[in-house]
Image: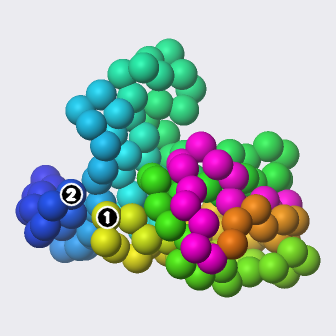
Amino acid sequence: MATVTSIGTGVYQVEDEGRQTVVYVAGTPGDLWAFTDGQVFHESRRSEGNAHAGLPRRSEAKAGHYEVGAPMPATVVKVLVAPGQAVRHGDTLLLVEAMKMELPIRAPADAIVKAVHCREGDLVQPDRTLVELG
């Protein structure tokens, strides 16, 4: 059984079978976002019946094409990739800051960076594609 401990506002430590993970949560009761280990989860009462509700939203895969976005409203702190660059699953693509925390946005799969749609200092929303991979 997992145990959850609040370690700050919107920050939780989850321990399950000896493995510890930090989870960041933001939003309102009807529109919650959770970020952990490079993945984003979104639950919205408005999206009931939507295939994305409760599933990872950081990337949308379409036949090997990935659109990577921010986990929540954030500021781009550092862009670490450029078009044409090869990345491996788990590589950090960029760093964003949200809720006074720096969060890495990681590659969901081995791929080539097709395009970067943000710059350092940009304010971004979770529905905006920041990096395209293919």
Q: Residue at x 9, y 62 (%)?
A: 5
| Marking on residue 10 | 2
Task: Tell whether 106 sits left or right of 46.
Answer: right
Up the image or down, 11 lies above or below 120; here it is: above
Per the image, label 2 sits on a secondary structure element best described as: loop
Res 113 → quadrant: bottom right
Q: Residue at x 35, y 51 (%)?
A: 34
Res 114 → quadrant: bottom right
Depth-wise, is mark 1 or mark 2 nearer the camera?
Answer: 1
Is the Cβ of the residue at disc 1 closer than 8 Å to that at disc 2? Answer: yes
Amino acid type shown at disc 1: Met
Q: Residue at x 27, y 69 (%)?
A: 22
| Marking on residue 79 | none
Task: Tell whether 14 sits left or right of 36.
Answer: left
Residue 128 visible here: yes
Q: Residues within 10 Å of mark 1 (few under 14, many from 20)?
A: some
Of residues 124 and 106, which is closer to you in this image? Answer: 124
Amino acid type shown at disc 2: Gly
Residue 92 visible here: no
| Marking on residue 99 | 1
Up the image or down, 116 lies above or below 94; here it is: above
Q: Residues within 10 Å of mark 2 (few under 14, many from 20)?
A: few
Q: CA distance from mark 1 to mark 2?
A: 8 Å
Q: Residue at x 31, y 71 (%)?
A: 100
Task: Tell whether 51 sits left or right of 47.
Answer: right
In magenta, the rendered stretch is: 120-134
Horizontal and vertical percent position of residue 117: 76, 62
Quarter of the picture containing the C terminus is bottom right
